[in-house]
Image (spheres, rainbow, N blue to C red):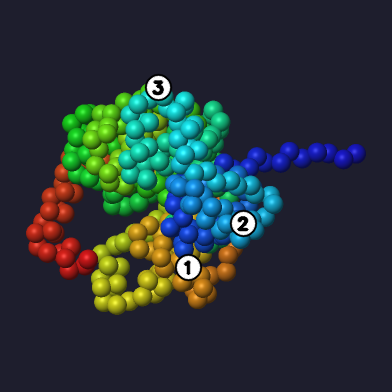
Amino acid sequence: MSQSIDKAPSRKLYCVLGSGSLPYSEKAFESLAAHSLDDFDLTLITDAVADKIALTEALEKLQLPSRHSWRVYDQAEADERALSLLAPYPHLAAFRFGHPCWRKITDPLLFAEPDEEIVILDPDLYFPNYFRFEETPANGLLLMYQPPSCLLPHEVVVHAYDCGIRLAHHTDIGVAQLSNNLDLEWLDWLVGELGGTSLPRSMHVESIVWAALALRIGGGYLNSEHWHCWRNSQWKRLLIRLGVSGRTVLRAERFGSIKCFHGGGIAKWWIPDAIKAGDLPEPKQLLVSQVPLPFEELTRDKYEKSRVLKDWAQRLGYYKLIR
């Protein structure tokens, strides 16, 4: 007698991006499709109709396996959904029209079903090995771990502390996992307290919102050995300043133990060249899941001490040297 086996549901993936990212995001989607052992349902959310056409053509060219599904929405289509879903939340509705990166917070919520999994991916990722995504918590948030801190601008961070808002340290949103059951009333309040429509159009404001949300709902950091953020450390900056190529700098990364590499900043432009040159090792299976580490709070005292060090470095001309 035959026995039916329940198939695992497709992972619900979202990416907010413009077509200008295609020189590196194509490699993100290509590696994702080639190495994800999870079936996935990918929703791309972009800007103009022209971006939608370019992204659609790029994904059609990749010929993703049929076990995966995907679609592309432009901003007008997202705006239409936001008219009703975000109508009770004016600060969130306006927040979508700030910096384009801020839509990574709001727009996946427009397309996910209630309580459904949301896995948000940046377009500058690379998946070098066969892997499965970690389990998405029913409550709480999973984020990548990124030292030292990308909470900017300074005045918004200080204003958050003045308002009594707690912030998590080392937060990076190369990958974010959560369920679609957020307290949107609180999130709307948060955006309003941080400045609402007066917020500076800085992409890093997004990190402040994630950092506040992390301590509000709990969760933790994805294991940084497997979910690895490239750090533009001082020695790497000096090597680049001395003329060392990006491909050479990347060879220091331990790609053999990485499920997902977030090539934030300049590193995202090096990945296509490294792939073309055959620099990266052959993929292997990395199926072990490790327990997330709890979020670390960035207290005001810690933050202000770090600012003192940065101010001294700036006065001494250190940043001009390594820029």
Distance between the Cα atoms at labels 3 and 1?
43 Å
Distance between the Cα atoms at labels 3 and 2?
37 Å
Task: Tell whether 169 sits left or right of 133.
Answer: left
Q: Earlier in the sequence, mark 1 or mark 2?
A: 2
Q: Residue at x 41, y 24 (%)?
A: 87
Choose mark 3 or mark 1, whichever is in front.
3
Q: Nearer the viewer, residue 300 or 191?
A: 191
The image position of residue 299, as x and y in percent, is: 23, 38
Distance between the Cα atoms at labels 1 and 2?
19 Å
Determine whether label 1 and label 2 are within 8 Å by CB. no
Choose mark 1 or mark 2, whichever is in front.
2
Q: Residue at x 54, y 52 (%)?
A: 53
Residue 88 has which mark? Answer: 3
Residue matched to label 2: 60
Determine whether label 3 and label 2 are within 8 Å by CB. no
Q: Residue at x 24, y 42 (%)?
A: 200
Residue matched to label 1: 272
Q: Would residue 51 be seen by someone viewing this image from the given angle? A: yes
Give the SS element for disc 3: loop
Q: Amino acid at mark 2?
A: Glu
Label 1, residues with CA under 10 Å away: few <14, some 14-19, many ≥20? some
